[in-house]
Amino acid sequence: MDQRNDSPREMVKGNWKCAECGTEITELPFEPAQDRPVHCRDCWSKKRTDRKRDFAGPRKMFQGNWKCAECGKEITELPFEPSQDQPIHCRDCWMKKREER
């Protein structure tokens, strides 16, 4: 389903081959441009993941000795540099707070 308007996405029928692996493609969620390659779902997902990894690179981690503001668990590594005026949460407590929103 298309998340923007909750209606099923219309599929375009045709006969294409994946530009990466050569798999036959008979349906696409868009009308492909004649001058652009098409990719099967697996190759598209892999290219998308690789692209994200290329842009983001490895995430910088900050080392230290902190305690979770909720449960008191020791925290030795964070994906951000904490500020003095903000509480720090362990991964479990952060996920719980995130789900509550």
Image: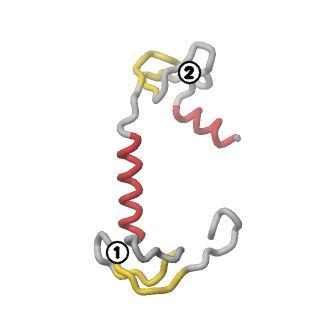
- Characterize the local packing of mark 2: few (<14), some (14-19) or many (20 or more) Cα atoms within 10 angstroms: few
Judged from this view, the residue extending furthest toward the left is: 21
User: Residue, x 45% and y 16% (percent of image)?
Assistant: 65
Where residue 38 sits in the image (x, y, percent)?
A: 40, 72
Which percent across, then down, holds residue 33? Answer: 46, 74
Q: Is residue 84 left or right of residue 51?
A: right
| Rendering coords of residue 35 (x, y %) | 40, 73
On screen, 66 above or below 98? above
Question: Camera-side residue: 28 or 91?
Answer: 28
Mark carried by residue 72? 2
Instruction: Classify residue 26 as left or right of residue 96.
Output: left
Badge 1 marks a residue whose secondary structure is loop
- Identified by mark 2, the residue type is Gly
Tell me if mark 1 has few (under 14), some (14-19) or many (20+) residues whose alpha carbon lies within 10 angstroms of its own.
Answer: some
Q: Residue at x 35, y 82 (%)?
A: 24
Spatial CA distance of label 2 from label 1 is: 52 Å
| Mark 2 residue element | loop
Image quadrant where residue 96 sits:
top right
Residue type of the residue flagged with mark 1: Cys
| Image location (x, y in percent) of residue 22 | 29, 77
* In-front residue for pair 76/63: 63
- Say which residue appears at 39% left-offset and 54% top-offset: 49
In the image, farthest residue toward the front: 35
Place residue 69 in its image quadrant: top right
> What number is the disc on residue 18?
1
Report the colour scheme. Answer: secondary structure
Q: Earlier in the sequence, mark 2 or mark 1?
A: 1
Q: Is residue 59 above or below residue 38?
A: above
